Image (cartoon, rainbow, N blue to C red):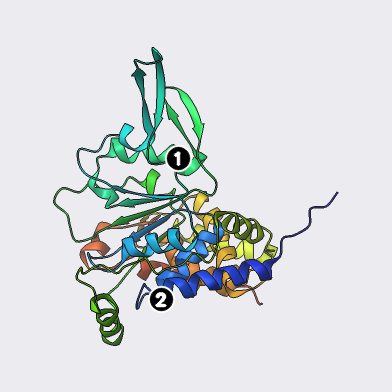
Amino acid sequence: MMTQAPDIATSHSLLLALKENFNSVVIGQEQAVDDVLACVAAGGHILVEGVPGLAKTLLARSLAQSADAEHVRIQFTPDLMPSDITGHTMFEQDTNKFIVREGPIFANIVIADEINRAPAKTQSALLEAMQEQQVSIEGDSRALPNPFIVIATQNPIEQEGTYPLPMAQLDRFLCKLLIDYPEPNDEIRMLKLVTHEQVANQFSLEDLKPVASTSDLIAIQTATSFISVDDSVQKYIVDIVSATRAWNGIDVGAGPRASISLLRAARGHAMLQGQSFVTPDNVKSMAPAVLRHRIQLTPDLEIEGYKPDDMVANLLNDTNAPRQ
Protein backbone atom coordinates (compact mmCIF):
# COMPACT_ATOMS: atom_id res chain seq x y z
CA MET A 1 0.00 0.00 0.00
CA MET A 2 1.53 3.34 -1.07
CA THR A 3 1.70 6.23 1.37
CA GLN A 4 -0.09 9.33 0.13
CA ALA A 5 2.20 12.35 -0.11
CA PRO A 6 1.19 15.23 2.19
CA ASP A 7 -0.16 18.48 0.77
CA ILE A 8 2.86 20.64 -0.08
CA ALA A 9 0.70 23.69 -0.90
CA THR A 10 -0.83 23.77 2.59
CA SER A 11 2.57 23.45 4.27
CA HIS A 12 3.96 26.19 2.02
CA SER A 13 1.10 28.50 3.06
CA LEU A 14 1.82 27.83 6.73
CA LEU A 15 5.49 28.68 6.23
CA LEU A 16 4.55 31.94 4.53
CA ALA A 17 2.28 32.81 7.47
CA LEU A 18 5.17 32.12 9.85
CA LYS A 19 7.46 34.26 7.70
CA GLU A 20 5.03 37.19 7.78
CA ASN A 21 4.81 36.88 11.57
CA PHE A 22 8.60 36.80 11.89
CA ASN A 23 9.13 39.85 9.70
CA SER A 24 6.71 41.89 11.80
CA VAL A 25 9.09 41.74 14.78
CA VAL A 26 12.52 40.72 13.42
CA ILE A 27 13.50 43.76 11.40
CA GLY A 28 16.09 43.72 8.62
CA GLN A 29 16.99 40.03 8.85
CA GLU A 30 15.03 38.59 5.92
CA GLN A 31 17.77 36.14 4.90
CA ALA A 32 18.07 34.79 8.46
CA VAL A 33 14.29 34.40 8.69
CA ASP A 34 14.20 32.44 5.41
CA ASP A 35 17.06 30.18 6.55
CA VAL A 36 15.39 29.54 9.92
CA LEU A 37 12.14 28.55 8.22
CA ALA A 38 13.98 26.26 5.80
CA CYS A 39 15.67 24.56 8.76
CA VAL A 40 12.37 24.25 10.63
CA ALA A 41 10.78 22.66 7.57
CA ALA A 42 13.70 20.22 7.42
CA GLY A 43 13.35 19.44 11.12
CA GLY A 44 16.91 20.53 11.95
CA HIS A 45 18.65 22.35 14.77
CA ILE A 46 19.99 25.85 14.25
CA LEU A 47 23.08 27.72 15.46
CA VAL A 48 22.77 31.50 15.16
CA GLU A 49 25.87 33.69 15.39
CA GLY A 50 26.11 37.45 15.55
CA VAL A 51 27.25 40.32 17.70
CA PRO A 52 25.08 41.23 20.73
CA GLY A 53 21.82 43.03 20.04
CA LEU A 54 21.01 41.63 16.59
CA ALA A 55 17.79 39.81 17.58
CA LYS A 56 19.21 36.28 17.77
CA THR A 57 17.12 35.36 20.81
CA LEU A 58 14.15 37.34 19.50
CA LEU A 59 14.22 35.25 16.33
CA ALA A 60 14.01 32.03 18.35
CA ARG A 61 11.28 33.36 20.65
CA SER A 62 9.27 34.53 17.64
CA LEU A 63 9.28 31.02 16.22
CA ALA A 64 8.08 29.54 19.49
CA GLN A 65 5.27 32.07 19.89
CA SER A 66 4.25 31.94 16.23
CA ALA A 67 3.87 28.15 16.43
CA ASP A 68 2.27 28.22 19.89
CA ALA A 69 4.97 25.75 20.95
CA GLU A 70 6.18 24.91 24.43
CA HIS A 71 9.55 26.57 24.66
CA VAL A 72 12.27 27.28 27.18
CA ARG A 73 15.27 29.58 27.24
CA ILE A 74 18.43 28.25 28.88
CA GLN A 75 21.15 30.77 29.65
CA PHE A 76 24.44 28.92 29.31
CA THR A 77 27.03 29.91 31.92
CA PRO A 78 30.38 28.47 33.04
CA ASP A 79 28.79 26.93 36.16
CA LEU A 80 25.88 25.26 34.32
CA MET A 81 25.83 21.50 34.92
CA PRO A 82 24.52 18.81 32.52
CA SER A 83 21.80 17.87 35.02
CA ASP A 84 20.59 21.48 34.92
CA ILE A 85 19.63 20.82 31.30
CA THR A 86 18.54 17.18 31.17
CA GLY A 87 17.19 16.69 34.68
CA HIS A 88 18.11 14.52 37.66
CA THR A 89 16.81 12.00 40.18
CA MET A 90 15.88 13.09 43.67
CA PHE A 91 14.61 11.37 46.80
CA GLU A 92 11.03 12.20 47.71
CA GLN A 93 10.42 11.79 51.40
CA ASP A 94 6.62 11.62 51.09
CA THR A 95 6.73 8.47 48.96
CA ASN A 96 10.11 7.24 50.22
CA LYS A 97 11.17 6.76 46.59
CA PHE A 98 13.56 8.24 44.06
CA ILE A 99 11.79 10.23 41.37
CA VAL A 100 13.02 11.79 38.13
CA ARG A 101 12.72 15.52 37.76
CA GLU A 102 12.88 16.38 34.06
CA GLY A 103 15.03 19.31 33.03
CA PRO A 104 14.11 22.27 30.82
CA ILE A 105 15.19 20.41 27.69
CA PHE A 106 11.79 18.68 27.64
CA ALA A 107 10.22 21.32 25.40
CA ASN A 108 9.39 21.66 21.71
CA ILE A 109 11.77 24.55 21.15
CA VAL A 110 14.88 24.93 23.30
CA ILE A 111 16.64 28.30 23.08
CA ALA A 112 20.24 27.77 24.17
CA ASP A 113 21.51 31.30 24.74
CA GLU A 114 25.27 31.88 24.47
CA ILE A 115 25.92 28.17 24.23
CA ASN A 116 29.68 28.66 24.01
CA ARG A 117 29.83 30.03 27.56
CA ALA A 118 29.32 26.56 29.05
CA PRO A 119 32.16 24.00 29.36
CA ALA A 120 32.39 21.00 27.04
CA LYS A 121 30.86 18.62 29.60
CA THR A 122 27.67 20.67 29.72
CA GLN A 123 27.61 21.23 25.97
CA SER A 124 27.81 17.47 25.46
CA ALA A 125 24.53 17.07 27.37
CA LEU A 126 22.85 18.30 24.20
CA LEU A 127 24.50 15.76 21.89
CA GLU A 128 22.20 12.82 22.62
CA ALA A 129 19.16 15.09 22.66
CA MET A 130 19.95 16.66 19.28
CA GLN A 131 20.85 13.39 17.57
CA GLU A 132 18.49 10.84 19.12
CA GLN A 133 15.69 13.13 20.40
CA GLN A 134 16.05 11.55 23.82
CA VAL A 135 18.09 12.05 26.99
CA SER A 136 19.44 9.64 29.56
CA ILE A 137 18.87 10.39 33.23
CA GLU A 138 20.61 7.99 35.61
CA GLY A 139 20.66 5.34 32.87
CA ASP A 140 16.98 5.79 32.02
CA SER A 141 16.30 6.99 28.46
CA ARG A 142 13.43 9.42 28.07
CA ALA A 143 11.98 10.58 24.76
CA LEU A 144 11.77 14.29 24.06
CA PRO A 145 8.61 15.90 22.66
CA ASN A 146 7.88 16.10 18.95
CA PRO A 147 8.72 18.42 17.31
CA PHE A 148 12.03 19.11 19.04
CA ILE A 149 14.22 21.96 17.79
CA VAL A 150 17.30 23.44 19.42
CA ILE A 151 18.08 27.04 18.49
CA ALA A 152 21.44 28.01 19.95
CA THR A 153 23.01 31.46 19.90
CA GLN A 154 26.59 32.57 20.29
CA ASN A 155 28.46 35.87 20.09
CA PRO A 156 31.63 35.73 17.99
CA ILE A 157 33.45 38.69 19.55
CA GLU A 158 33.31 37.60 23.19
CA GLN A 159 36.37 35.44 23.64
CA GLU A 160 36.99 35.68 27.37
CA GLY A 161 35.02 33.11 29.33
CA THR A 162 33.87 31.17 26.27
CA TYR A 163 34.46 27.58 25.20
CA PRO A 164 34.56 26.75 21.48
CA LEU A 165 31.99 24.18 20.41
CA PRO A 166 33.57 20.84 19.48
CA MET A 167 33.18 19.63 15.90
CA ALA A 168 31.01 16.72 17.05
CA GLN A 169 28.50 19.18 18.47
CA LEU A 170 28.67 21.61 15.56
CA ASP A 171 27.92 18.72 13.21
CA ARG A 172 24.57 18.18 14.95
CA PHE A 173 23.35 21.61 13.88
CA LEU A 174 21.70 21.44 10.48
CA CYS A 175 22.65 25.05 9.77
CA LYS A 176 24.77 27.84 11.17
CA LEU A 177 23.26 31.23 10.42
CA LEU A 178 25.12 34.53 10.52
CA ILE A 179 23.19 37.64 11.51
CA ASP A 180 24.68 40.96 10.45
CA TYR A 181 23.89 44.60 11.20
CA PRO A 182 20.61 45.89 9.72
CA GLU A 183 20.47 48.54 7.02
CA PRO A 184 19.92 52.15 8.24
CA ASN A 185 16.29 52.22 7.05
CA ASP A 186 15.58 48.97 8.87
CA GLU A 187 17.22 50.32 12.00
CA ILE A 188 15.02 53.42 11.88
CA ARG A 189 11.96 51.19 11.55
CA MET A 190 13.22 49.17 14.51
CA LEU A 191 13.58 52.33 16.62
CA LYS A 192 9.97 53.27 15.98
CA LEU A 193 8.63 49.82 16.80
CA VAL A 194 10.68 49.24 19.94
CA THR A 195 10.49 52.67 21.57
CA HIS A 196 6.94 53.80 20.73
CA GLU A 197 4.88 53.85 23.95
CA GLN A 198 7.30 51.42 25.59
CA VAL A 199 9.61 51.95 28.54
CA ALA A 200 11.88 48.93 28.11
CA ASN A 201 14.27 48.50 25.20
CA GLN A 202 13.09 45.01 24.28
CA PHE A 203 10.50 44.30 21.61
CA SER A 204 7.26 43.06 23.13
CA LEU A 205 5.93 39.76 21.76
CA GLU A 206 2.58 40.08 23.52
CA ASP A 207 0.83 41.08 20.29
CA LEU A 208 2.45 38.30 18.24
CA LYS A 209 -0.39 35.85 17.67
CA PRO A 210 0.17 32.16 16.85
CA VAL A 211 -0.39 31.38 13.18
CA ALA A 212 0.42 27.66 13.42
CA SER A 213 0.62 24.84 15.96
CA THR A 214 3.11 22.14 16.84
CA SER A 215 0.94 19.75 14.81
CA ASP A 216 1.38 22.09 11.86
CA LEU A 217 5.16 22.02 12.31
CA ILE A 218 5.10 18.22 12.24
CA ALA A 219 2.92 18.32 9.09
CA ILE A 220 5.33 20.76 7.43
CA GLN A 221 8.33 18.56 8.26
CA THR A 222 6.53 15.46 6.98
CA ALA A 223 5.53 17.17 3.73
CA THR A 224 9.09 18.44 3.26
CA SER A 225 10.46 14.91 3.51
CA PHE A 226 8.31 13.97 0.49
CA ILE A 227 9.80 16.63 -1.80
CA SER A 228 11.54 14.76 -4.60
CA VAL A 229 15.27 15.01 -5.27
CA ASP A 230 16.57 13.90 -8.66
CA ASP A 231 19.61 11.60 -8.78
CA SER A 232 21.59 14.30 -10.57
CA VAL A 233 20.88 16.78 -7.75
CA GLN A 234 21.92 14.20 -5.16
CA LYS A 235 25.18 13.71 -7.04
CA TYR A 236 25.62 17.49 -7.13
CA ILE A 237 25.27 17.59 -3.33
CA VAL A 238 27.85 14.84 -2.88
CA ASP A 239 30.21 16.58 -5.34
CA ILE A 240 30.03 19.81 -3.31
CA VAL A 241 30.66 18.10 0.03
CA SER A 242 33.41 15.89 -1.39
CA ALA A 243 35.14 18.98 -2.79
CA THR A 244 35.59 20.35 0.74
CA ARG A 245 37.78 17.35 1.59
CA ALA A 246 40.36 18.08 -1.10
CA TRP A 247 40.02 21.85 -1.52
CA ASN A 248 43.16 23.94 -1.27
CA GLY A 249 42.90 26.03 1.88
CA ILE A 250 40.49 23.74 3.74
CA ASP A 251 42.28 21.85 6.49
CA VAL A 252 39.30 19.70 7.60
CA GLY A 253 36.51 18.93 5.15
CA ALA A 254 32.87 18.10 5.78
CA GLY A 255 31.78 14.55 6.60
CA PRO A 256 28.90 12.45 5.25
CA ARG A 257 26.44 14.08 7.65
CA ALA A 258 26.99 17.29 5.69
CA SER A 259 25.64 15.64 2.53
CA ILE A 260 22.55 14.47 4.40
CA SER A 261 22.11 17.90 5.98
CA LEU A 262 22.50 19.72 2.67
CA LEU A 263 19.85 17.54 1.07
CA ARG A 264 17.47 18.12 4.00
CA ALA A 265 18.11 21.87 4.01
CA ALA A 266 17.61 22.06 0.23
CA ARG A 267 14.27 20.32 0.66
CA GLY A 268 13.35 22.88 3.33
CA HIS A 269 14.29 25.71 0.98
CA ALA A 270 12.22 24.15 -1.80
CA MET A 271 9.24 23.97 0.57
CA LEU A 272 9.68 27.64 1.42
CA GLN A 273 9.58 28.36 -2.33
CA GLY A 274 6.49 26.20 -2.79
CA GLN A 275 8.26 23.65 -5.01
CA SER A 276 7.58 19.93 -5.17
CA PHE A 277 11.15 19.11 -6.16
CA VAL A 278 14.67 20.27 -5.29
CA THR A 279 16.65 22.32 -7.81
CA PRO A 280 20.40 23.09 -7.87
CA ASP A 281 19.52 26.65 -6.82
CA ASN A 282 17.97 25.32 -3.61
CA VAL A 283 21.22 23.50 -2.91
CA LYS A 284 23.33 26.59 -3.63
CA SER A 285 21.13 28.75 -1.41
CA MET A 286 21.59 26.51 1.64
CA ALA A 287 25.19 25.36 1.07
CA PRO A 288 26.86 28.20 3.04
CA ALA A 289 24.61 27.69 6.09
CA VAL A 290 25.13 23.92 6.03
CA LEU A 291 28.89 23.89 5.39
CA ARG A 292 30.36 26.95 7.14
CA HIS A 293 30.52 25.24 10.54
CA ARG A 294 31.63 21.87 9.17
CA ILE A 295 34.92 22.93 7.59
CA GLN A 296 38.14 24.31 9.04
CA LEU A 297 40.47 26.53 7.06
CA THR A 298 44.24 26.17 7.08
CA PRO A 299 45.94 28.45 9.65
CA ASP A 300 47.60 30.60 6.98
CA LEU A 301 44.27 31.44 5.32
CA GLU A 302 42.72 32.26 8.68
CA ILE A 303 45.59 34.64 9.39
CA GLU A 304 44.98 36.31 6.02
CA GLY A 305 41.35 36.90 7.01
CA TYR A 306 39.59 34.33 4.85
CA LYS A 307 36.27 32.94 6.08
CA PRO A 308 34.63 29.53 5.48
CA ASP A 309 32.01 31.28 3.34
CA ASP A 310 34.77 32.39 0.96
CA MET A 311 35.82 28.78 0.40
CA VAL A 312 32.22 27.59 0.00
CA ALA A 313 31.59 30.29 -2.61
CA ASN A 314 34.72 29.25 -4.53
CA LEU A 315 33.90 25.56 -4.61
CA LEU A 316 30.29 26.27 -5.61
CA ASN A 317 31.61 28.26 -8.58
CA ASP A 318 33.89 25.39 -9.59
CA THR A 319 31.41 22.51 -9.09
CA ASN A 320 29.30 21.78 -12.14
CA ALA A 321 25.56 21.93 -11.41
CA PRO A 322 23.13 19.71 -13.27
CA ARG A 323 20.87 21.32 -15.82
CA GLN A 324 17.43 22.04 -14.43
Q: Can you tell which mark lies on residue 27?
A: none
In the current view of this chain or complex, which residue is farthest to the right? 1
- Looking at marks 2 and 1 on the same chain, the residue that comes earlier in the sequence is marked by 2
Judging depth in this view, the residue of 2 and 252 nearest the camera is: 2
Q: Is residue 91 visible?
A: yes
Identify residue for label 1: 129
Give residue 23's position: percent from left, percent from top. Answer: 42, 75
Q: Nearer the viewer, residue 162 or 37?
A: 37
Give how far apart the Cα atoms at labels 2 and 1 are.
Answer: 31 Å
Q: Is residue 319 visible?
A: no
Structural crowding at the residue carrying mark 2, measured as other residues with C-alpha within 10 Å and reported as few (<14), some (14–19) or many (≥20): few
Residue displayed at 69% across by 65% down: 230
Q: Is residue 89 above or below residue 114?
A: above
Q: Is residue 305 left or right of residue 128?
A: left
Q: Residue at x 35, y 76 (%)?
A: 27
* Camera-side residue of 305 and 147: 147
The three-letter amino acid code for the residue at tag 1 is Ala
How busy is the neighbourhood of tag 1: few (under 14 within 10 Å), some, or many (20 plus)?
many
Residue plotted at (50% across, 39% down): 144
Residue 261 image position (x, y, % from top left): 52, 55
- Residue 13, percent across and down? 61, 72
Q: Are marks 2 and 1 in contact (CB under 8 Å)?
A: no
Q: Residue at the far bottom: name it.
A: 185
Amino acid residing under circle 2: Ser
Give the x, y percent position of residue 308: 35, 64
Residue indicated by mark 2: 24
